[in-house]
Image: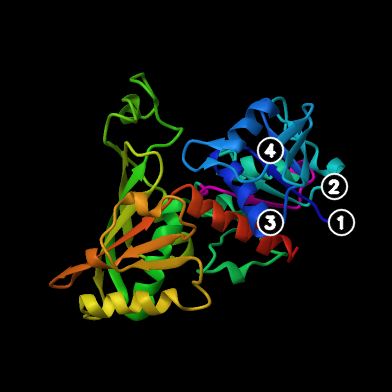
Amino acid sequence: MKKIALYGFGRIGRQFLKIAVKNNSVLPSYIADIQPLPTLAALLSVDTNYGRWEESVSTEGDSVLKIGNHAINYVNSKTEIPDWGALGVDMVVDCSGRASTRAGAQAHIDRGAKYVLISAPSKSLADCDAVLLKGINLEQFSPTDHKIISMGSCTTNALAVVVKVILENFGIQYGLFSTVHSYTNSQSLTDQPMKDRRDSWAAAENIIPSSSGAARALQFIWKDLKITGKAYRIPTKTGSIAELNLITEKDCTVEEVNEAFRKAAKTEQLKGVLDVLEEEWTSARIVGDPHSSLIDLPLTTKEGNLLSVAAWYDNEWGFSNRLAETADYIFKRI
């Protein structure tokens, strides 16, 4: 019987497991992390962003995690990546953040896994076999050619929906985006020297400019796309918004653009991936929302040939939903 393993049980890994249980999709046979299982189980049970999990969570010693009626084997990977071949694991979902290079992802294959799905943008297209996003190009998955698959980032998934709809309806000459993004674990709780100088200041007290790998990941999908952008990390625990400013190939009105998004949200391909907001909201509205991208229709604006579209996304929960769905899709086809 085929088996899947979850490598890295941090914020995304824990939400991935909850969603897999909730959606009755493929569950990992093994979870691997470097931290003690009782602590990880406690973090799964009570989440600062989403509250207490509805299922019971417990452990059996240091080797089994129980969530609801499911028992999942736990492997401490502090010293090395588990021997996936010996464990019979076919596919690894890497949520460690350390597989964005081919060498990092290949390490799982060298240990016996046949496929690796990465919950992060790869450094370059050479570092993965494909970037596959649900609602965009997931159906292009090839079991023969795609052994290392990148899911991009939460921002990549949010922007890809906007790019798809605008490209198909009005074309894109070029554009710029800015994402206003909740702080993450790569930042500091208090002021301290960091590799990225701007990250040296307290995440919960500052607006911190940052880079975004979303533009590069989008170009992995649309090689001729001329879009770049940046991020601003802000003091919110989760929930983000990206503004994409575009010069379109075809002239369009605000209402035509908004109607294109309304229609796209009703298509089978983008069901559950794209949604639209007709009224004025703040980030609290989208915390816990499973969509990759929620278009704030009242914020769509146009001046001359410059179009501006704003897309909300829960950078943790929305992305984890796509990751779980993508893992399920790929696993059933390998």
Between disc 1 and disc 3, the foreground one is: 1
Query: What is the CA distance from the residue labelled 4 to the residue labelled 2?
Result: 25 Å
* Rendered location of residue 229, percent (x, y): 31, 52
Q: Residues within 10 Å of mark 3 (few under 14, many from 20)?
A: many
**Residue at the disc numbered 4:** 57
> Could you tell me which residue is drawn at 40 percent across and 30 percent down?
187
Image quarter of residue 1: bottom right
Q: Which mark is residue 168?
A: none
Between disc 1 and disc 2, the foreground one is 1
Q: Residue at x 67, y 67 (%)?
A: 142
Secondary element at image label 3? loop
Answer above or below: position of 249 versus 211. below
Q: Earlier in the sequence, mark 1 or mark 2?
A: 1
Can residue 300 be seen?
yes
Which kind of residue does numbered mark 3 sit on? Lys
Mark seen at residue 88: 2
| Labels 4 and 1: the sequence-earlier one | 1
Circle 1 crowding by C-alpha within 10 Å: few under 14, some 14–19, many from 20: few
Q: In which quarter of the view is residue 163 placed?
A: bottom left
Q: CA distance from mark 1 to mark 3?
A: 19 Å
Q: Are marks 4 and 1 in contact (CB under 8 Å)?
A: no
Q: Earlier in the sequence, mark 4 or mark 2?
A: 4
Region of the chain picked out in magenta, as a range: 110-122
Residue type at mark 1?
A: Met
Magenta stretch encompasses residue 116: yes
98 within the magenta span:
no
The circle drawn on residue 1 is 1
- Tag 4: residue type? Val
Instruction: First in sequence, mark 2 or 3: give its number.
Output: 2
Residue 70 image position (x, y, % from top left): 77, 46
